[in-house]
Amino acid sequence: MKRTVLCVLLIVALVLPVGALTGEETAGALAGLLDTGPAGLLSALTPGDALSDWAAILAGRAGETRGAEAYLSGLWDYVSRQYQEIGGLDPLQATEWHRVALAVTALGADPTCFGLDARGEPIDLVADGVYAWQTTESLGAQGLNGWIFALLLLDAGGWEPPETARYTRQHILRAILEAQEPDGGFGLTAGASDVDLTAMALQALAPYREDCPEAVQGALDYLSRAQTARGDFLAWGTGSAESCAQVVIALCALGIDPRLDPRFVKAGGSALDGLLLYRREDGAFCHSLEDEAGFLATEQAGLALCALERMDGGGARLYDFTDVPLQAFQPKKGGSGYLLWAAALLPVAGIVIILVRKGRKAWTG
């Protein structure tokens, strides 16, 4: 039910016309995606939920911070509860720390002192989730994405691990580079390159492209070969909006225009055109061309549009948050943010019920 609500919120909010998006139109398209009414997108999300946290990252990077205090309050409660009940955010996945810390940072709070553990001590999400990781044997235990998002998080805030750190920046960078396959791509596990992980690896490698030019070039060549004649990208034999979005984010991180670079402009269109193939008439995005619009696809497409808008405007990379002034966050007494969240959902509850009764389904990944 919760994910259906999130999907409806974005789909109802979108009023974008179908057609190509030029540089000047991107900012307007992004604003339309985030316009969910006077309370803003953040007030309708559930802190700690993966889809919601990524939507919060999108909102923060796009400058749509209405409801940020309530969202951060809810996220503080979530982090504190997880630490007090199970000793951390997740028993296996480091990316849980990375996602939450990115959301906290994107909304202007300091993730190195966010939440309280069972002893009442401040929680350092960056240390616990990256350089002092101890929850599993390795940061990469869940797959290559554990290394990738660890590096993205470190660079997002420019955090420097201490000399005594279990994992240094160079250690993490080396682990990513060593995972590159002979075909130039990257995969969640060894021996299986895929578009999404290759694009994510490039996003993490972007600040180091001058130090590893061959690795970057190999990954770009892999993605160029994976692009279809119509402009989109195949992952495991199937095109998807999410794969296209990750490639657009990667290209923008490297300063490569996904609309114009000849490596990513095929007979039927550019990398951006490929993403827009998945936009429905109401402006929302679908996972595959056979699916109805879904929240995850729309959310990731929004992140890609945000990356493009930032590149066009000369701004920092999507995951470079050093332009965000951070402050230590303290929730107001008795204010978890959940009551505000519940109130914000009431206006759309009727819409959700109608859609469910009509048997419409939204793909959410």
Image (cartoon, rainbow, N blue to C red):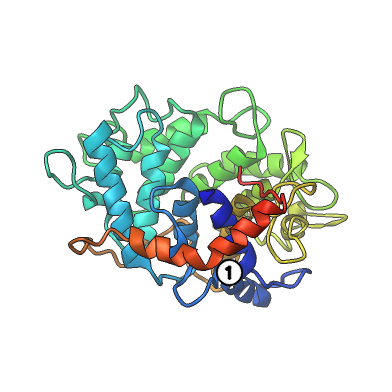
In the image as oriented, which residue stretches furthest toward the right?
267
As drawn, 365 above or below 277:
above
Residue behind mark 1 = 309
| Residue in the picture at 69% in, 57% down | 285
- Asked if residue 87 lies left or right of residue 345, the reply is left
Residue 30 percent across, percent down from the top left: 59, 70
* Quadrant in the rendering for residue 133: top left
Q: Residue at x 64, y 26 (%)?
A: 192
User: Dot 1 lies on which element?
Assistant: helix
Residue 175 percent across, percent down from the top left:
45, 30
Vertical arrangement, residue 141 with respect to residue 216, above or below: above
Which residue sits at x=60%, y=44%? 199
**Residue type, numbered disc 1:** Glu
The answer to whether residue 11 is left or right of residue 94 is: right
Can see residue 249? no
Which is more toward the observer, 228 or 37? 37
State which quadrant residue 23 falls in: bottom right
Give coordinates of residue 202: x percent, y percent.
56, 45
What is the tally of numbered marks visible in this picture?
1
Give x and y (percent) for residue 317: 49, 60
Relative to 59, residue 268 above or below: above
Task: Work out whether 245 lies above or below 29.
Answer: above
Depth check, front residue: 287 or 180: 287
Residue drawn at x 45%, y 66% is 344
